[in-house]
Image (cartoon, helix red, strand yellow):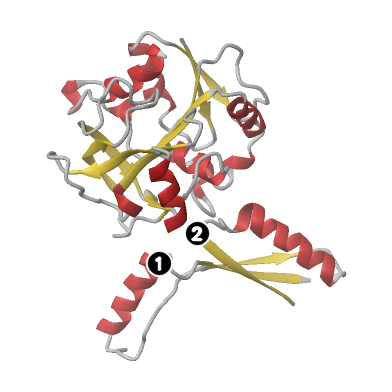
Amino acid sequence: MKVSILQFPGTNCEYDTQYAFEKLGATTQIVWHKSTTIPEDTDLLVVAGGFSYGDYLRSGAIAKFSPVMSAVKEYAENGGKILGICNGFQVLTEARLLPGALKRNEGLHFISKHHHLRVENCDNVFLKKLHTGDVVNIPIAHHDGNYYINDEGLAELEANGQILLKYTDANGEIQNPNGSVAGIAGVCNKEKNIFGLMPHPERAMESLLGSDDGIKMLEGFLAS
Amino acid sequence: MKAIVNVFLKAGVLDSQGKAVHHALNSLQFGNVEDVRVGKQIILKINETDKEKAMSDVTKMCEDLLANTVIEDYTIELV
């Protein structure tokens, strides 16, 4: 299993992501955004969290024009698996590889804390090690995590099983920290090869640090 | 010439910043303020004399980068 992790100026979760996948036995490589190709034999491409280009203008707006993004789009079109975490999710929506957009949190605060999430659909590689209805504890850390999609788009996401995760309390009841439409924390594309979520599974790899529920999520990719 | 681009969240998309400013104005006793929308203004200095060309270029800039048309609308004024 070879995982390539994208690094833009301002990315700051690339090494946590590397730690997480290496802990699971994957080989990893960090790819600078000026690269015009994705390393050969990449089984999973991760767009890591952080603040690409300082989040100037909008989160992820400038990163979508980095040289590497043409290769990312080509990789996606060929069915390659892509995971976008936090800023990576924002970059993927800006690049229109995932539906919807991320807005400023409803309460206008930066939120950094552990949060529970409910698995909405496990019929995909990302969550195949979990079951629909499972509740996991994964940290969130974002200012622009308020997922928006119009009613028509939301109906389409629901119909296609593209909503992967929702923000809940420990009992699995919706508890929305940022105003996201329908409490959505993560979605995938129709083809289910591109996944994006605002929470950070790579920061939930050690029970000592509060949760190791991220292992179950990221393991899904390794088994595929 | 200059292009003044205004970017706002689309009508119907909750503008949390506008809402916060609205509350603040109401607490300052400006009870006659009915709604507030907060957006951004981007001023571009363009080396171009053809207005039509400038308008079409700036429209493309808005569609590609300056606005996220999933959630935002934009207006362009050339001066």
Identify the residue at image location x=65%, y=57%: B63
Left/right placement of residue A201 relative to residue A71 reads: left
Left/right placement of residue A203 relative to residue A10 reads: left
Q: Is residue A70 above or below residue A79?
A: below
Return the chain for callout 1: B
Circle 1 sits in a helix, a strand or a loop, which is it? loop
Identify the residue at image location x=71%, y=62%: B59
* Neighbours of disc 2 within 10 Å: few (<14), some (14-19), many (20+): many
Mark 2: amino acid: Ile
From the image, state whether disc 2 or disc 1 is nearer to you. Answer: 2
Residue A180 showing in the rendered view = no
Q: Which mark is residue B71?
A: 2
Residue A41: x percent and y percent?
A: 57, 11
Return the chain for callout 2: B
* Neighbours of disc 1 within 10 Å: few (<14), some (14-19), many (20+): some
Residue B6: x percent and y percent?
A: 59, 70
Circle 2 sits in a helix, a strand or a loop, which is it? loop
Identify the residue at image location x=49%, y=36%: A190
Mark 1: amino acid: Asp
